């Protein structure tokens, strides 16, 4: 059974939520953190009081979901499935701060209600009036992939025909400070457009939301395969996993027209990506995406949005091409992403 991307929407640090040429202009940032470029959420959340009570991550998710549904031409999906590693960090911080300041008394319940991980998918369902299957996966660097796998299984089991699925995460001042202590981010300011040429440790923090409508009716882009690998023992194991994944779909590395990797400017990970591309994909054009959206656990959702857009538009924007020359015809794209060296994911997209 073939599964297709029938619609998609993305809210990110780039101009992805507005109409216009696909990543024709890359927005530049200086520092070690990329914040979402918020669109006008009033177009999707008309009630001002409702929107006022929503956290940023909820509005990001609703915006991306609504864009995906509009592109697919549907109003009501058969299921809503979301992946998020951090959940609603801002509301969690508000709740904990008020609990400490108020000495655990006279607390407003709103921040607590809005702080749970499934708030995004729940608010989307409330806004749509959708009473169907609704699930949120919180699996660190595999959160989006787990949601994607659940969607694929449901479509193959024919328990749903059109599923709204997405990945969303936010970064806050508190979480950025805490994660910075682990050495995850650059100590010195860096321009995101120069991130991939960086030779120092760490990367830049990011956030965003990308949603897709998946279904069995033919669309422009086919979701052919998905696979994950947790804590591989060596780079050879990663290479073998990629070759095995392609062999499962009766493909070889030479059948891939474009390889999208999760390069993030971290000197500690660059050698692994370089070795992989040189040994398995020496003649294949490669692209990158984390200089556009930053590093976060569900960044692969942005990569899938970007890959699907490239196939649909049959062009690779100059700002995302990392090496090689993109072919005129883009039929197959392989996305290989890793998060903190432990969570490795493969997503295969094809032109329908």
Image (spheres, rainbow, N blue to C red):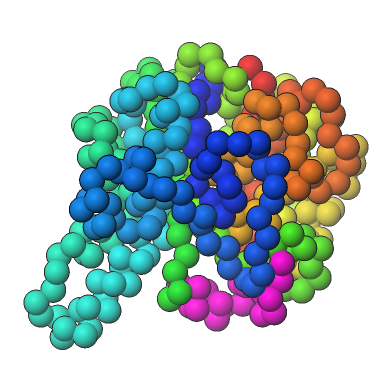
Above-or-below relation of 82 to 333: below
Q: Residue 184: x, y in percent?
A: 61, 72
Q: Residue at x 37, y 22 (%)?
A: 74
Q: Residue 336: x, y in percent?
A: 68, 44
Q: Residue at x 53, y 41 (%)?
A: 18
Above-or-below relation of 158 to 302: above
Q: Nearer the viewer, residue 245 or 312?
A: 312
Q: Is residue 330 visible?
A: yes
Left or right of residue 318: residue 69? left
Tell me the quadrant of the picture where the C terminus can be found: top right
What range is drawn magenta here?
175-191
Q: Residue at x 46, y 53 (%)?
A: 38
Left or right of residue 58: residue 53? left
Q: Nearer the viewer, residue 20 or 284?
A: 20
Q: Is residue 29 magenta?
A: no
Q: Residue 2: x, y in percent?
A: 54, 17
Dividing the picture into quadrants, the one containing residue 27 is bottom right
Q: Is residue 186 magenta?
A: yes
Q: Nearer the viewer, residue 132 or 74?
A: 74
Q: Is residue 227 visible?
A: no
Total numbered circles = 0
Q: Residue 173: x, y in percent?
A: 45, 74
Q: Residue at x 53, y 26 (%)?
A: 5
């Amino acid at each position: 059974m073939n599964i297709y991307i029938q619609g998609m929407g993305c809210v990110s640090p780039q101009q992805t939520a507005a109409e216009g040429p696909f990543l024709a202009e890359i927005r530049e940032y200086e520092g070690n953190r990329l914040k979402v470029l918020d669109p006008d959420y009033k177009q999707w959340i008309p009630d001002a009081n409702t929107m006022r009570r929503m956290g940023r991550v909820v509005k990001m998710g609703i915006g991306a979901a609504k864009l995906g549904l509009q592109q697919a031409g549907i109003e009501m999906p058969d299921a809503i499935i979301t992946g998020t590693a951090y959940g609603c960090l801002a509301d969690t911080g508000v709740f904990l701060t008020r609990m400490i300041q108020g000495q655990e008394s006279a607390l407003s319940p709103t921040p607590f209600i809005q702080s749970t991980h499934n708030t995004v998918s729940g608010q989307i369902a409330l806004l749509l009036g959708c009473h169907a299957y609704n699930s949120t996966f919180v699996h660190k660097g595999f959160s989006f992939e787990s949601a994607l796998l659940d969607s694929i299984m449901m479509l193959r089991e024919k328990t749903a025909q059109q599923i709204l699925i997405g990945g969303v995460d936010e970064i806050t001042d508190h979480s950025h400070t805490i994660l910075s202590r682990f050495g995850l981010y650059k100590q010195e300011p860096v321009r995101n457009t120069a991130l991939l040429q960086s030779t120092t440790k760490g990367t830049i923090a990011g956030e965003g939301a990308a949603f897709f409508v998946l279904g069995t009716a033919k669309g422009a882009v086919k979701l052919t395969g998905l696979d994950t690998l947790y804590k591989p023992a060596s780079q050879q194991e990663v290479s073998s996993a990629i070759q095995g994944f392609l062999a499962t779909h009766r493909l070889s590395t030479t059948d891939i027209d474009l390889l999208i990797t999760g390069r993030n400017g971290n000197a500690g990970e660059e050698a692994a990506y370089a070795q992989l591309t040189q040994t398995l994909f020496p003649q294949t054009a490669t692209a990158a995406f984390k200089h556009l959206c930053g590093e976060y656990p569900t960044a692969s959702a942005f990569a899938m949005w970007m890959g699907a857009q490239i196939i649909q538009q049959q062009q690779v924007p100059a700002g995302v091409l990392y090496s090689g020359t993109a072919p005129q015809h883009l039929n197959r794209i392989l996305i290989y992403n890793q998060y903190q060296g432990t969570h490795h994911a493969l997503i295969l997209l094809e032109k329908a």
